[in-house]
Image (cartoon, rainbow, N blue to C red):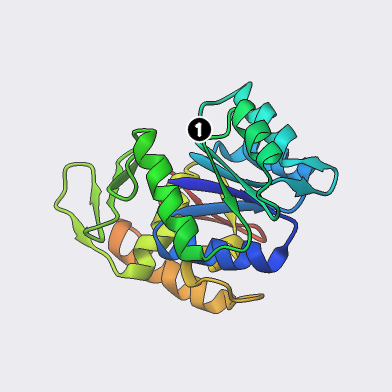
Amino acid sequence: MKILIVDDDHDLLALVGFALRQAGYVVVDAGDFAAAMRVFLAESPDLAVLDINLPGGSGFAICEAIRTRSRIPVMMLTVRGEEEDVVRALELGADDYLTKPFSPRTLLARVKALLRRAGIEAGGAMAAGDLALDLEAHSLRIADAEPLRLTKLETRLLQILIANAGHVVGTERLLTHVWGHRGSGDRQLLKQLVRRLRQKIEADPAEPRYLQTEPGAGYRLVG
């Protein structure tokens, strides 16, 4: 389950992103209008959380653009909570709104409610080719073989790779998703985690079929 968060407050992006990742979601974010549109088109998120006031445009414009392409749930954020903003957001197709300041716990509850109303289940299973990941059981099934037990970190790494199957996922993005808000992160930790995971899922870890390295860029999962 992939969620797009758009806000020009980088501290808020980090806080909300961490809370959503801890709850098991894949998070992509942007800090302005142009970046938000690029990320939306590239990532195809399942839900969008949009601040109204943004550099280069507005959350209203992003909501309107999303609605020409998709029916994903959209939540608007505002510091004012004025009726005119709420009415305009709903008229443009937003599904909910939340007034700043808010707690990550409140946002998480509203996100879960939106996904339920949209008939989208959070958690559960994800799949790519031969690989089927059970997020709740922390297990991976490869084709018809018996499920493999995974650690929490291995599950989180596979979650973001499966969500982006066939595409390179950058090292910093992987570090943020697996370990949370870590600044520049620790690339050696990621290398060790990838090595352990390959020992479990690859017939020949030295020549990986599924979890491939893209030198200087990150990792790619091929199902």
x, y percentage for residue 110?
44, 50
Q: What residue is drawn where x is 55% and y is 68%?
A: 175
Q: What residue is drawn where x is 43% and y is 71%?
A: 193
Going by the numbered disc 1, the residue's amino acid type is Ile
x, y percentage for residue 75?
56, 43
Q: What residue is drawn where x is 62% and y is 66%?
A: 14
As rendered, which of 86 and 143 lies closer to the eye?
A: 86
The answer to whether residue 208 is seen in the rendering is: no
x, y percentage for residue 122?
34, 47
Q: What residue is drawn where x is 56% and y is 63%?
A: 102
39 with respect to 109 (left or right): right
Pointer 1 residue: 72
Q: Is residue 136 above or below residue 223?
A: below
x, y percentage for residue 101?
62, 63
The answer to whether residue 141 is seen in the rendering is: yes
In the rendered image, which quarter contains the C terminus?
top left
Disc 1 residue crowd, few under 14, some 14–19, many 20+, Cα 10 Å: some
As rendered, which of 115 and 148 lies closer to the eye?
A: 115
155 with respect to 31 (left or right): left
Q: Quadrant of residue 15?
A: bottom right
158 with respect to 61 (left or right): left
Q: Is residue 103 above or below residue 70?
A: below
